[in-house]
Amino acid sequence: MIRIEPPMMVLNQPPAPRPSVLHIFKVYYPDLFGGTLTVIRDICASLKDTFNAAVLVCSRSGGERQIVVNDVAVERVHSFGDVLSLPAAPTYPWRLWRRIAEHDLLALHAPFPLADLVFAFGLGHTRPLVVHWHADIVSHAALRFLVEPMMRRTLRRASAIIVSDPVLVETTPLLQEFSDKCHAVPFGVDVEKYDRPAAQGDDVNARGRLVLACGRLVPYKGFDVLVRSAHARNFEVWIVGEGREREHLEQLIRDYGLQDRVRLLGSVSESERVKLMRIADVFVMPSVTNAETFGLVQLEAMAASRPIVNTALDTGVPHVARHGLEAITVPPGDPTALADAIETLINDPERRRRMGQAARHRALTKYSTTAFKEGVETVYRKVVSEEAAAKDAGSLAPAPRPQTAGLIGAIQIAGALAWSDVRHRYVRSLLGPFWMSIQMAIMVAVLGSVIGHLSNASAVARLPMLAASLTAWTFLNSVVLDATTALQGSASLIKDRALPPVIFLLQCTFRQALFAAHNAVVPLVLWLALTPRDIGGAIAALPGLVLFVVSALGVSLVLGALATRYRDIKPIIESSLTLAFLASPIIWTPEMIDRGSTVMRLNPLTHLFAVWRDPLASGHVAMTSVIYVLACLAALAAAAVVTITQLRKAAFWI
Amino acid sequence: MARIDLQDVCLDYPLYGAYDFSLKRRLLGRLFRQSSEMRTIRAIDSISIDAKAGARIGLAGPNGSGKSTLLRLIAGVFPATSGKVEISGNIVPLLGLGAGVNLDFVAADNISLLLRISGRKPTPAILEEIWAFTELEERMQRLPLRMFSSGMLMRVLFATATAFPADILLLDEWLSVVDENFSAKAEQRLRKMVETAAIVIIASHDHALLRRTCNSIINLDHGRIASTVALDAPVPHHLELREISA
């Protein structure tokens, strides 16, 4: 048995008095008001004794980056505006990633694909994540196929998912997959805030024609349906809220000639809203899509003893205020049914009173702020303590943590080794990082002048291409040469630390790629200085360059293994590389060589250079070259697969 | 749950270099009807071990009896030629301390790299912890390992290798850690690591050591299990045992 003992690796962390929670959402006060924000604010405020809260959001107002809202630190990432209902804040994922380590718990208020991006790439896996599922993505359904895999990954990684109503788990396919993690914690409302001043006597306005609705003016709220429903009836409609639909709604009101009965009040303060709720006769929530999951405002109206008219969505909406008890529920998007329901209530003050009382009773008993606070706190605490327990157990039996297994682990280790190689290459050098670049510059200068004498074309104009070709060749040459000795050089790591041999072959490519990045300074400077800087050509060259690097990787895997197994391969490779250098159009430019030469045509290197060099020079590439390279790559891939299976035996060879 | 299950495992070690199996010899061999079979040595010969959590296995036997090869086979370095190998749990092979060390790098870089090689992220806190264990001066972190005495080097490598516990711990020879002061501390840490690991396999010539740390000893000879000795729970008073076995 594994004994539960204090972990050996005790990190000297002072016991934090309060764990800290990072709330992740797209927007926050003071840029916007709305249901989700109220929920976040209430969580922060009600849990302030047990959890330290911080908020990371986007903001297009361009104000201070760090502000404090209701004693909560809010960091705002600059956004350039909304694209497809999402803030265009390119730095948000980066900021989020940087902030994750500073907190003990992450609370993602979904949907927010920008944050999903971070979690989908497996970043921030060191901290537990709770997803507050506020809504599914309903708008822009065509783009759902892009977002859904990311959301699924986020949910898979989450320790717990909090929904406002159990029905959401049943009706949302994505949540069904993770139903065991879902916790239903209904939102709460502070009923006392809606208490009538004692002076005001009668609960029900006898005239009774004031209909109130609240919410951001966005399409899913269905306010256009409400405006239409007012047509040819006699009730008044006041809509509280602001948003991008305003103009459309104003147009609609004018079209129906309802200016005298339908008013858009814009944003109002919270106390003002409470007053409005108290004087309204009927509260309407005409939302038309499942983006409305709960309807916090209808709960507030219930707390204010208002009868509700809501819509039969597949969400918590008709469960919070139930048809016939606290509300009349009508089909979404049906102005006639909506108007009929409103009129029923308008014409029946007694029913309004009864429903209002039932609504207040339900808000008081089922949706108390205490229950909400305790529900969220229980989930947060559970997740934090589970993580702490897992961490303890992790340092005892860290089965999932070390990632030596698998390709990702191998790539990570190879990357770390290569990076270390590069960093230490300069340990005792005089010129520092760029002695390689200088070497390359000298080589280009000498060869360039020689070639300039050989051909009559302008040598200077050809220098950038020569430098790029030499850099690429140096990369390929070094990768292959490195690979032939890599496994023997790392014998102790393979045999004593049981590292997979493929790591050390990958390491060669990574290391040489980093060196090539240094050398690339020379062609880059020459290109910028001597050519018209055709960016399009450079971009067109990128796919070819990727093919080139992948080929180098494939060749190094296969030859590296072969050279370790059969020791006479290494000298053969060395002499072949020299031959290849001379027989390939590396220092010769395309115009200088005779493309008809059989050796040139059959030499894979000709095409391997052509696939990126031709687009760079002329903007297009011969199809034969692409096909030739792809065919070679397919063969290489097959050989690499065989090699990797054979590499299990590499320990015998070294 | 950690488990090692070997059933009739054999390992034929190919002897490259000891014989000439070049193309020429192979072709001529076929011509003269010589067997062109590859020369191998059976390093492990139908060994079956079933170790569950709590097992402390000592491997004893003369040089070349297959102790290290068996450890490497369990670690996944060598694939078995035949038989069934099933291992679950995270293996930490401590078969040689010096693997992956570059003497030209400063100590802190070496530690970071070694941690990365074992799939760990070197955070400052972990580096701090490791360095505290070595009892070396703070400023020596920035010195290349080349400048360290062999005792100091051993401290650094030992502290790094044992920074994290394991499900399955494979030790080739009880790591001899020189320095008098340090060796008590090192032995304590290693002992603790052995206690927290679910399965420990130690290969050693030192019978006394095996007796005081293991609950069963497997004697190997020419790649076969010559005998298996089950011991009672390891006796803490190892000095007495040492006298008896001496």
Image (tube, grey):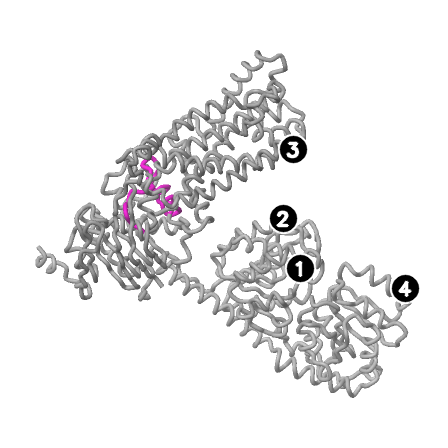
Circle 2 SS class: loop
Circle 4 SS class: helix
A357 w.r.t. A504: above or below: below
The boundaries of the magenta stretch are B93-117
Residue that badge 3 annotates: A623
Residue nearest the viewer, comparing A428 with B54: B54
- How far from the left and from the top, in percent, is residue A49? 51, 69
Circle 3 SS class: helix
Judge whether residue A158 can be spotted in this image. Answer: yes
Residue nearest the viewer, comparing A261 with B95: B95
Q: Quote the CA–CA distance across marks 4 and 1.
A: 33 Å
Question: Are tags 3 and 1 found on a single chain?
Answer: yes
Judge whether residue B182 can be spotted in this image. Answer: no
Camera-near label (3 vs 1) is 3
For image coordinates 23% across by 49% down, the residue present is B66
Residue that badge 2 annotates: A90
- How far from the left and from the top, in percent, is residue A403? 42, 52
Per the rendering, the mark at residue B43 is none
- How far from the left and from the top, in percent, is residue A396? 35, 60
Location of residue B243 (image quadrant): bottom left
- Amino acid at circle 1: Pro
